[in-house]
Image: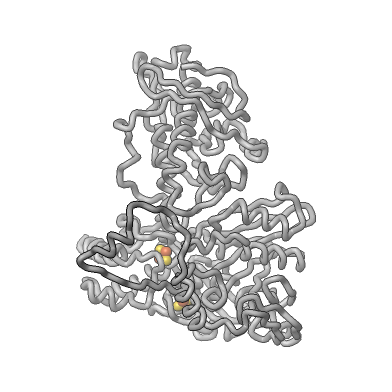
């Protein structure tokens, strides 16, 4: 049995410890917001937070996540209120949408570490997240917008 | 305006221009038996296959094109809602089932492709919205005992200006569902458009921002197993023999079955299925394409390109013009085979039971896939229910003439007698999926 703490909830899962966290989230826990794109840390679709750090869940053995705090897109906010989600909606970022959970989770870590990222900061931090639909320009704008929303929130 | 009693099941063809605007004969396909099933619930107003208005004010627009990022779950509803004079904040979208009334108006089968969706659906959805609006107005007029001409529809309400009365679409839904279907409808004058031609927010963005959007790969069914298939190492290869023992020894693996596409390992989830797949020992008969070589193929194409091709159009004397040209530019363009690389790897869920088959997948080609599923299941097409999910990219990869990704899921489900999700790995698709054509 491995104990996981996902989005503030505890789960005991009976899986092989080498199973990638991605498949435990998706198949065992039914949290399908986290996506499979490549299974080899090449696309970023499976990005989640492990103790606040962005990790590729497709190459993270579940044993490494045991007992640690895991956050998935489902746990980012209860009601689309996270500044990134608000910015994403305002700017209408997604097209097919498949990559977007990973994009948002990666962006969340960037904004935590850098409250006012430049275009270059964004491009550097987001380089590992592929979007086949090519929504990059709007992702960039939305991250800037989320930074603004965060700043407003901070002022209040 | 005439509102003759005509069955909803009839196609009507007439077109007249009357004073005051364009009145057209309705050319809406009627609801099929499946859509008219009692499951609709009391009071729901479903005048045609494209829209339902509930007593709860929800306006559900049924979209017969696949959402793969192009925004069709927003643009087609805009067209219908425009004519319906619906309250945009009440719009819900539902994927159409497979039925003749949802066929592409030009291609005659149900599919999404070729950048054709908006223009080919435009007239149809305007009519569908206008028809619903007309019936709601007629229902209000009847309720108030006034002329329909004295009422108008606006933002989800029918208004009677003379008396200041108004009724919402939800309040009118029940009565509207008893009104006789019109044979003609008046379409709005495009100068009065409020939605069409305006930038609108996409309806599917919130669900694509919090993980709730359901793609084919996210479908869950009770008792569902997941399969990963060992696919041919070269195009056209066939399984000669295989040893499943190591695969079956992987915890969580339940079945190993041979299908047309290769050998499927069926397990509790993707990970054991993939591990089982990797543990399979297969002897392949690589067939005549074993020696296929990109370089040789390229040379063959170059040679073929020297031969005269089919003439699409002939105009003027190109040869003479080129001969007398002051400057001649020559260029060779080559395009390799490319994987479409949809962000969502290929997948399909099938549940074959003795009396029917259900399929869930992100497809661009509903008619073909439904028929292929029926064939693979050994059932008549009427017993196949295909549910179109969101597509994590299409690009034509999900409109394939042989419906292979649907067929294989049906084969596996039929064999193991359980709902099965077949998932392609990224490598499976890059290595052996359908490519974009080369030239
Ligand atoms: S699925 Fe993990 S990086 Fe692509
Ligand atoms: S929105 Fe389609 S892959 Fe990014």
Quadrant holding the C terminus of chain A: bottom left
If the picture is divided into quarters, which one holds ligand 2? bottom left
Tell me if I can see residue B131 in this picture.
yes
Quadrant holding the N terminus of chain A: bottom right
Indicate whether A119 appears above or below A40.
above
Q: Quadrant of residue A144?
A: bottom left
Image location of residue A41, percent across then percent down: 45, 81
Q: Quadrant of residue B225?
A: bottom right
Taking depth in this image into account, of B123 and B158 the one nearest to the observer is B123
Taking depth in this image into account, of A26 and A98 the one nearest to the observer is A98
Indicate whether A66 appears above or below B185.
below
- Residue drawn at the location 70% of the way across and 78% of the way down: B238
- Residue drawn at the location 44% of the way across and 16% of the way down: B148
Indicate whether B234 appears above or below B142.
below
Image location of residue B184, percent across then percent down: 49, 23
Image location of residue A99, percent across then percent down: 43, 67
Tell me if I can see residue B273 in this picture.
no
Question: Is B55 displayed left or right of B284 in the figure?
Answer: left
């Amino acid at each position: 049995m491995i104990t996981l703490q996902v989005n503030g909830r505890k789960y005991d899962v009976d899986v092989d410890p080498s199973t990638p966290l991605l498949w435990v989230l998706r198949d065992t826990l039914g949290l399908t917001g986290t996506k499979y794109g490549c299974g080899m840390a090449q696309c970023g679709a499976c990005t989640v937070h492990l103790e606040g750090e962005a990790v590729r869940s497709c190459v993270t053995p579940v044993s490494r996540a045991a007992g640690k705090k895991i956050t998935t897109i489902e746990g980012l906010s209860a009601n689309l209120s996270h500044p990134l989600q608000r910015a994403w909606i305002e700017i209408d970022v997604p097209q097919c949408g498949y990559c977007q959970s990973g994009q948002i989770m990666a962006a969340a870590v960037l904004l935590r570490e850098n409250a006012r990222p430049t275009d270059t900061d964004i491009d550097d931090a987001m380089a590992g997240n592929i979007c086949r639909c090519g929504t990059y320009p709007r992702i960039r704008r939305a991250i800037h917008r989320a930074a603004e929303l965060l700043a407003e929130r901070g002022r209040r | 305006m005439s509102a003759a009693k005509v069955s909803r099941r009839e196609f009507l063809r007439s077109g007249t221009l009357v004073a005051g605007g364009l009145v057209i004969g309705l050319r809406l396909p009627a609801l099929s038996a499946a859509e008219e099933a009692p499951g609709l619930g009391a009071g729901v107003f479903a005048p045609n296959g494209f829209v339902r208005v509930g007593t709860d004010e929800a306006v559900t627009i049924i979209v017969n094109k696949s959402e793969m990022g192009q925004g069709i779950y927003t643009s087609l509803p805009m067209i219908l809602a425009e004519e319906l004079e619906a309250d945009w904040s009440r719009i819900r979208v539902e994927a159409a089932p497979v039925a003749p009334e949802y066929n592409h108006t030009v291609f005659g089968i149900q599919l999404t492709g070729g950048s054709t969706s908006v223009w080919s659906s435009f007239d149809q959805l305007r009519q569908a919205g206008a028809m619903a609006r007309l019936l709601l107005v007629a229902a209000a007029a009847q309720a108030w005992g006034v002329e329909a001409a004295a009422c108008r529809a606006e933002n989800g309400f029918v208004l009677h200006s003379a008396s200041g009365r108004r009724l919402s679409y939800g309040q009118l839904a029940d009565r509207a569902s008893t009104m006789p279907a019109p044979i003609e409808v008046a379409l709005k004058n495009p100068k009065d458009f409020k939605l069409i031609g305006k930038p609108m927010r996409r309806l599917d963005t919130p669900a694509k921002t919090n993980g709730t959007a359901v793609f084919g790969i996210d479908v869950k069914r009770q008792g569902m197993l997941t399969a990963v298939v060992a696919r041919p190492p070269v195009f056209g290869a066939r399984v000669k023999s295989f040893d499943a023992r190591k695969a079956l020894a992987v915890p969580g693996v339940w079945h190993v079955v041979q299908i047309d596409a290769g050998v499927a390992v069926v397990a509790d989830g993707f990970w054991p299925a993939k591990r089982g797949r990797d543990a399979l020992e297969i002897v392949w008969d690589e067939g005549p394409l074993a020696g296929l070589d990109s370089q040789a193929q390229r040379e063959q194409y170059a040679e073929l390109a020297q031969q005269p091709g089919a003439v699409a159009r002939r105009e003027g004397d190109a040869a003479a013009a080129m001969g007398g040209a002051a400057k001649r530019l020559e260029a060779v363009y080559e395009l390799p085979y490319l994987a479409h690389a949809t962000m969502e790897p290929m997948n399909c869920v099938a549940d074959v039971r003795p009396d029917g088959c259900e399929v869930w997948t992100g497809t661009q080609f509903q008619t073909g896939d439904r028929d292929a599923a029926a064939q693979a299941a050994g059932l008549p097409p009427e017993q196949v229910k295909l549910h179109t999910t969101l597509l994590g990219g299409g690009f034509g990869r999900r409109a394939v003439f042989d419906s292979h990704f649907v067929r294989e899921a049906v084969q596996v489900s039929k064999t193991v007698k359980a709902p099965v999700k077949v998932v392609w790995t990224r490598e499976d698709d890059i290595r052996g999926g359908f490519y974009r054509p080369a030239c």
